[in-house]
Amino acid sequence: MDLLTTTSAVAVSSYALLSTIYKSAQALYAQPAINPPLQDNLGRSESLPSVDVIVPCFNEDPITLAQCLESLAGQDYTGKLQVYVVDDGSANRNVVAPVHKLYASDPRFSIILLANNVGKRKAQIAAIRSSSGDLVLNVDSDTILAADVVAKLVLKMHDPQVGAAMGQLIASNRSQTWLTRLIDMEYWLACNEERAAQARFGAVMCCCGPCAMYRRSALALLLDQYEAQFFRGKPSDFGEDRHLTILMLKAGFRTEYVSDAIAATVVPDRLGPYLRQQLRWARSTFRDTFLALRLLPELDGYLTLDVIGQNLGPLLLALSSLAALAQLLIVGSVPWWTGLTIAAMTIVRCSVAALRARELRFLGFSLHTPINIFLLLPLKAYALCTLSNSDWLSRKLANVPTEGEKQSVILHPSAGRSAASKWGMPGTVHQAGLSHPESSLTATKSGRDRSSACK
């Protein structure tokens, strides 16, 4: 039985060593680099690139959609801005029709109604091929942008070598439950540690779906590959943000992260939807990690460490946890070394995050460790065994009022105004918002897991 003790101790020690090296390098490279400032041409609209904003929607709550479009209408960008709202065959189209009507009268907005549900990726492509702007900004329909997001992303895209750039994501419903608070911290770490360190080398490995800008000339080269992604002979219809980012890197473009371009997105508020989301993300990550391995020889050595840290680290943690659990159940002895090592690593990581973010709430991120060990690691193992499954797991019919319920929204000239300011975003939003009868329009307010944020 000493084999279990030795296996657990060796695995957790290896995990601690790898994590220390990886996280130390990540923290070092995540610090803002001192670069010469880019020339700011944002005051002269004639010199600015045109931007097409693509918003694919499927069974979206009308209030959420209205807030998203409101934030786009209020962007402080003096260049040409066109917004393409693509309704992907929603079953609740009559419910969101007032939102479409409200913005259809704005010449900056185009409403595209697809006859059938074709999936988020094809909905995006339909709008991309119908537009002609120099830059394309993908925005999820449950995301609210700060007023300066477009301007800041455009400034980063001033470098012709940059093919894609993403903003920083926060949870718009952070205060809703303990889980949304935890996910908000997870997003901060993913953006300001992982993505920030990758951006030091111009190789962000996933420009997250809720807020990612692309250069059209680069998209034109990659759109057919993006549309026709297959895995083991089957069409792959999720993980579109990560796959498109990898294609950009393969084509020789840089991918960047803009920390002060803030986007607030809705996150799952219950454990079930959160785990379904994580399962889909895990499958997507595994699929595109295999593709990304071919890129590593051309990238900085840190990116190889990053891939090893993100894939070998969880494997070592899972092995040590399984051996420790077997030691406890079979031998009856407490695996103190494994438990204390994991606890120490957790405390150090959360303390460093609290120090960097200057927020004590990050000490509470220690709750993520037991969730990771007992829920997420087994889920990732299941994802690896079911990679061929392309079910979205969450793209079910939603927001469809039952017969007899009111299928209308009430337009108000001021309700919902300045939604972005709720999360401390700069600037204000000026378009009209919406209110609705309480009985029929709250289907996706709870437990939604359709976001493609930060994975």
Image (cartoon, rainbow, N blue to C red):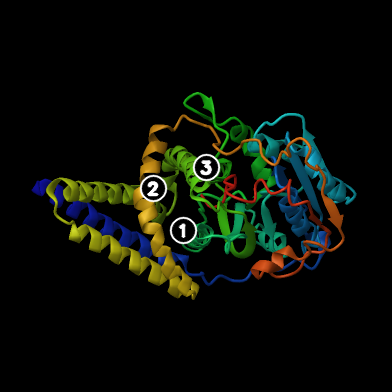
Q: Nearer the viewer, residue 205 or 252?
A: 205
Q: Amino acid at mark 1?
A: Glu
Residue 263 place in picture, x, y as percent? 64, 59
Q: Residue at x 17, y 57 (%)?
A: 334
Residue 260 place in picture, x, y as percent? 61, 67
The residue beneath circle 1 is 194
Q: Amino acid at mark 3?
A: Lys
The residue beneath circle 3 is 250
**Relative to 419, residue 105 above or below:** above
Q: Nearer the viewer, residue 400 or 231?
A: 400
Inter-mark Cα distance, 2 to 3 = 33 Å
**Relative to 237, residue 446 above or below:** below
Q: Nearer the viewer, residue 117 or 326?
A: 326
Inter-mark Cα distance, 3 to 1 = 20 Å
Q: Nearer the viewer, mark 2 or mark 3?
A: 2
- The crowd level at tag 1 (other Cα within 10 Å; few <14, some 14-19, many 20+) is many
| Res. 272 mark | none
**Relative to 32, residue 52 above or below:** above
Horizontal side of residue 260 vs 404, given as left or right: left
Asked if the residue under mark 1 is in contact with the one under mark 3, i.e. CB atoms within 8 Å, the reply is no
- The crowd level at tag 3 (other Cα within 10 Å; few <14, some 14-19, many 20+) is some
Q: Residue 419: tell me if it is visible.
A: yes
Q: Residue 49: tell me if it is visible.
A: no
Kind of element beneath mark 2: helix
Kind of element beneath mark 1: helix
Q: Residue at x 22, y 58 (%)?
A: 338
The residue beneath circle 2 is 375
Disc with the residue nearer the chain's start (2 vs 3): 3
